[in-house]
């Protein structure tokens, strides 16, 4: 038993709080329950990248909103010695306990989703326990991918063509620091596409289809981000933007295989939020701090769970018309992109400084969201109490542990 405090290095927090993570899951479940239980959604769901951000929220929305059985695939680290587990480990442990207590089938596969081995382990599990799946949510955000030939490729967050000059906020000192990045070379662009593009999504669907595990009418989704013009130099027009462009290609390539089971594939544009993956993007802290200020003042700020629940309830399974753009993507970022919200961001983008940080931005809200992601500053948690760092999760055989 030990007392756990946040330990922050750069954009990383190297500790996580098991009780705070569980409370965060409880808060997400409570939001879904506040929107009511429904019968018009999927009953058997596979989530690839199920332990953090949008993937975990998708799992909670479908389990507690539609009473769905869920299979979650993720890559998380258990505690070892005095070292805490990763936040996604604690959150999955809490989700599993809550879902099972509610009588919901829940199974977890921990390991490298890019590998054929984990794909087959997951397919075996679905075949044995669920027969087929009605929804496949692909929500992976990974720094690297091991290719079938054993080589490792890494994704990079770099501009393309021109250098990027921006600012970032130091988490501890609240000072603004310049960030400058040289443009990516061709190999860095293609490696990022290999890691964060659509190829692995296609491989998952091919593996499931080959085994006959896609139920009639099955839907598959993949989350993307387009964002605002101020972040385009580093995001949309950068290496990660190229990878996201590849999702649109993969979506087109999946139309036919999904149609063979009367199903559909969608790329879904989500709102910018603080997640493990997003906190690593240079300059994102300023953008999100300005965005949170504008959206909270307008009363339309959402977190991951509000986004995914609204997505399933009003779009994917809402029965009405889908909010599609010219690229056939479903838009869930329409509130972020409202002209008055973006005007506020654009007007203040170049004038943020350490002196006016609190007046112009919601850096405190950004920081709180970052800490909450690791189970810290979650209301109702006693951070002076000693807690057990070693929390067990029942894992599918074949998982890493
Ligand atoms: P996240 O870091 O919170 O979660 C990533 C998930 O992927 C975790 O469950 C993690 O365990 C899993 N994972 C990583 N590597 C893995 C591997 N090799 N094998 C198995 N699992 C692995 O990320 P997130 O921000 O929720 O991102 C999910 C998706 O949503 C991404 O496509 C991202 O681009 C997209 N998105 C994010 C934002 C945002 O602002 N955060 C906005 C729009 C879209």
Image: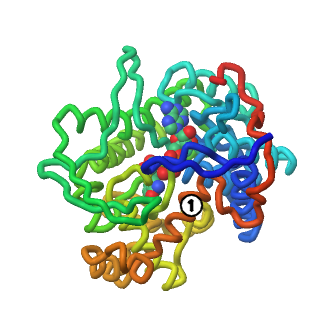
Does the Cβ of the disc 1 residue fall within 8 Å of ligand 1? Answer: yes
Above or below residue 297? Residue 268 is: above
Local crowd size for mark 1, using a 10 Å CA cut-off: few (<14), some (14–19), many (≥20): many
Whether 359 is drawn above or below 40: the answer is: below
The image shows residue 52 at horizontal and vertical percentages of 58, 48
Q: Determine the residue located farthest toward the top in the rendered image.
A: 149
Q: Measured from the top left, where is residue 223 in percent x and y?
A: 46, 52
**Residue at coordinates 39% horizontally, 57% vertically from top-left?**
225
Asked whether the viewer can see residue 337, the reply is yes
Residue depicted at x 39% and y 15%: 150
Say which element carries label 1. helix
- Tell me where residue 3 appears, x and y as whole percent: 74, 47
Quadrant of the image for the N terminus? top right
Q: How many marks?
A: 1
The residue that label 1 is drawn on is 304
Q: Quadrant of residue 2?
A: top right
- Residue 65 seen in this snapshot: no
Q: Nearer the viewer, residue 163 or 176?
A: 176
Which residue is at the front of the view, 16 or 149?
Answer: 16
């Amino acid at each position: 038993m030990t007392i756990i405090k946040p330990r922050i290095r750069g954009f990383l927090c190297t500790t996580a709080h098991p009780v705070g993570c569980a409370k965060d899951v409880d808060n997400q479940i409570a939001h879904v329950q506040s929107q009511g239980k429904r019968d018009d959604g999927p009953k058997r769901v596979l989530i690839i990248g199920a332990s953090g951000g949008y993937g975990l929220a998708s799992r909670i929305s479908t389990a507690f909103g539609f009473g769905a059985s869920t299979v979650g695939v993720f890559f998380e680290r258990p505690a070892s010695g005095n070292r805490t587990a990763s936040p996604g480990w604690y959150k999955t442990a809490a989700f599993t306990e809550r879902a099972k207590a509610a009588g919901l089938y829940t199974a977890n596969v921990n390991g490298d989703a890019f590998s054929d081995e984990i794909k087959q382990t997951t397919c075996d599990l679905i075949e044995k326990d669920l027969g087929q799946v009605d929804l496949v949510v692909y929500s992976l955000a990974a720094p690297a991918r091991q290719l079938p030939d054993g080589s490792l490729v890494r994704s990079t967050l770099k501009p393309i063509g021109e250098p990027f000059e921006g600012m970032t906020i130091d988490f501890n000192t609240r000072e603004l620091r310049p960030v400058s990045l040289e443009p990516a070379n061709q190999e860095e662009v293609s490696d990022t596409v290999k890691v964060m593009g659509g190829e692995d999504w296609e491989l998952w669907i091919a593996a499931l289809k080959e085994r006959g595990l896609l139920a009639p009418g099955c839907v598959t989704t993949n989350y993307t981000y387009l964002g605002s013009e101020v972040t385009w130099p580093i995001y949309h027009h950068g290496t990660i933007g190229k990878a996201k462009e590849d999702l649109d290609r993969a979506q087109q390539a999946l139309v036919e295989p999904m149609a063979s089971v009367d199903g559909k594939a969608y790329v879904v544009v989500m709102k910018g939020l603080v997640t493990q993956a997003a906190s690593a993007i240079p300059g994102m802290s300023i953008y999100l701090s300005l965005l949170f200020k504008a959206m909270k003042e307008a009363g339309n700020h959402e977190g991951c769970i509000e986004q995914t629940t609204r997505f399933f309830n009003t779009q994917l399974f809402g029965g009405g018309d889908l909010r599609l753009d010219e690229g056939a993507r479903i838009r869930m970022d329409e509130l972020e992109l409202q002209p008055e919200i973006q005007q506020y961001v654009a007007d203040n983008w170049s004038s943020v400084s350490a002196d006016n940080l609190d007046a112009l931005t919601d850096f405190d809200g950004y920081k709180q969201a970052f800490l909450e992601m690791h189970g810290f500053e979650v209301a109702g948690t006693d951070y002076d109490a000693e807690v057990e760092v070693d929390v067990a999760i029942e894992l599918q055989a074949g998982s890493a542990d």
